[in-house]
């Protein structure tokens, strides 16, 4: 089965107008549990989506944080006891979860139109059209440094991240193969449009791991998105890979002297999905429709620098709601920042995830 889903498949989506009509006469308060990444992103979603959603519908929101993956969703579906309702997923997990039957299928045509009236299925950019759930935001893995801790010449390319001679000191990297393998090849001179074809060969994989090996002794591995800004602030690393929005918040709200290097950024997409079999499907569908509307995505993007995946939502993003700074220069999908971006090939990772996890873990243990 091909993993390159070109169109969504209408399935069990309940008419949203029916969902909006209330709880069918029951006096029992309605509530759902949403699961996301916590931290600055979680705060942005709470202010931009959860609070206004509850005010508009009366449906309560319980929030849980996690670090990604399908293990907890799979366990709940397997035993038929669903605690989570709506989950923010990385796209590889969303596609794998859809293939495994862990997520409800969604008809984008039934979602609200764009801010300009464009039908939803057309308003979502191509990267945001999936069989299970809806695309939400472009985000990226970048690397950043603390300007105060690098005197003289500053790093400007992905190669600089791996250059321990020109920029000595510890590096921070996420303890997963994703992004690290891509960054290693970019730093080693592989053109952006050849990164995944290179990874598709035994020689290319060896080349990526050899490049990682060249800095392995200087790496501090992180797992949660809140860690990289803290590593930079504490001076534990000279530079670190990170989620661009986490660095942005440290820059703008905490006045940290951090600098993002956009060269070779790995541009990725977020997915909002519903756990298969939830007994709160009607409420979950209502929440998904609200959370992935152009207006909601723009409200999130005015709080953290992730680009809406609805065309009509992009024009609604102006300045940061607190700091007042123009958001355009900080957006991963802005023309200037996307010029040297590598688009995450989720299909490659869906096909190779288990193999890469195994090899990466074995490499780490050596």
Image (cartoon, rainbow, N blue to C red):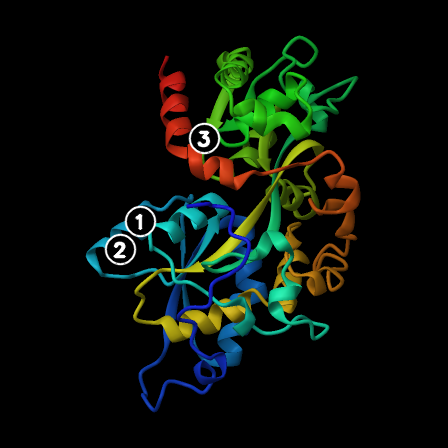
What crowding class fits label 3: few (fewer than 14 Cα within 10 Å), some (14-19), or many (20 or more)? some
Q: How far from the left and from the top, in percent, is residue 233?
A: 60, 32
**In the displayed structure image, the side of residue 187 where residue 171 appears, left or right:** left
Q: For the residues marked 2 and 1, what is the alpha-carbon distance in whole angstroms?
A: 6 Å
Tag of residue 176: 3
Q: Residues within 10 Å of mark 1 (few under 14, many from 20)?
A: some
State the residue at coordinates (76%, 58%).
319
Q: Quadrant of residue 162?
A: top right
In the displayed structure, 293 sits above or below 361; it is below
Give me the C-alpha separation between circle 3 and circle 2.
24 Å
Residue at 38% x, 28% y: name it.
355
Residue 195 in view: yes
Q: Are marks 2 and 1 in contact (CB under 8 Å)?
A: yes
Image position, residue 247 (x, y; %): 63, 40
Outermost residue toward the front in this view: 1
10 Å crowding of disc 2: few (<14), some (14-19), many (20+):
some
Element carrying mark 1: helix
Q: Under tag 3, what secondary structure?
A: loop
View extreme (bottom): residue: 25
Helix, strand or loop at mark 2: helix
Query: Which residue lies at the image location 60% right of the left edge and 66% below the top edge?
Result: 121
| 282 sits to left or right of 133 | left
Number of marks in picture = 3
Depth check: give the residue in front, 160 or 259.
Answer: 160
Q: Is residue 2 above or below residue 236?
A: below
Give the residue number, with chain letter if any, for mark 1.
72
Residue in front for this viewpoint, 128 or 9:
9
As drawn, the label of residue 76 is 2
The mark that comes first in sequence, 1 or 3, is 1
């Amino acid at each position: 089965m091909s993993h390159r889903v070109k169109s969504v498949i209408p399935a069990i989506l309940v008419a949203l107008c029916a969902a909006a009509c209330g709880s069918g006469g029951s006096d029992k308060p309605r509530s759902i549990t949403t699961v996301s990444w916590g931290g600055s992103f979680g705060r942005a979603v709470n202010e931009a989506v959860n609070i206004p959603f509850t005010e508009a519908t009366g449906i309560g929101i319980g929030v849980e944080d996690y670090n990604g993956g399908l293990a907890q969703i799979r366990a709940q579906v397997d035993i038929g006891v669903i605690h989570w309702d709506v989950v923010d997923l990385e796209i590889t997990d969303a596609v794998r979860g859809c293939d495994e039957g862990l997520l409800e299928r969604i008809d984008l045509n039934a979602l609200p139109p764009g801010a300009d009236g464009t039908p939803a299925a057309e308003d979502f950019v191509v990267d945001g059209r999936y069989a299970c759930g809806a695309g939400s935001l472009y985000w990226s893995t970048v690397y950043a440094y603390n300007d105060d801790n690098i005197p003289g010449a500053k790093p400007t390319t992905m190669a600089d991240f791996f250059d321990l001679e020109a920029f000595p000191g510890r590096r921070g990297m996420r303890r997963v193969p994703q992004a690290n393998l891509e960054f290693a090849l970019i730093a080693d001179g592989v053109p952006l449009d050849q990164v995944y074809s290179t990874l598709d060969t035994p020689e290319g994989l060896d080349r990526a791991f050899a490049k990682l090996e060249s800095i392995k002794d200087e790496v501090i591995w992180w797992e949660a998105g809140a860690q990289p800004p803290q590593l930079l602030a504490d001076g534990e690393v000279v530079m670190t890979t990170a989620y661009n929005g986490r660095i942005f918040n440290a820059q703008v709200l905490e006045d940290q002297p951090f600098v993002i290097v956009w060269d070779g950024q790995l541009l990725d997409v977020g997915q909002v999905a519903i756990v298969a079999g939830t007994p709160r499907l009607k409420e979950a569908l209502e929440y998904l429709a609200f959370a992935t509307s152009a207006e909601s995505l723009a409200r999130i993007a005015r709080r953290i620098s992730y680009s809406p995946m609805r065309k009509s939502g992009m024009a609604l993003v102006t300045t940061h709601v607190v700091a007042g700074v123009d958001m355009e220069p900080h957006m991963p999908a802005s023309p200037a920042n996307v010029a040297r971006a590598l688009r995450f090939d989720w299909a490659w990772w869906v096909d190779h995830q288990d193999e890469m996890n195994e090899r990466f873990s074995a490499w780490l243990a050596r």
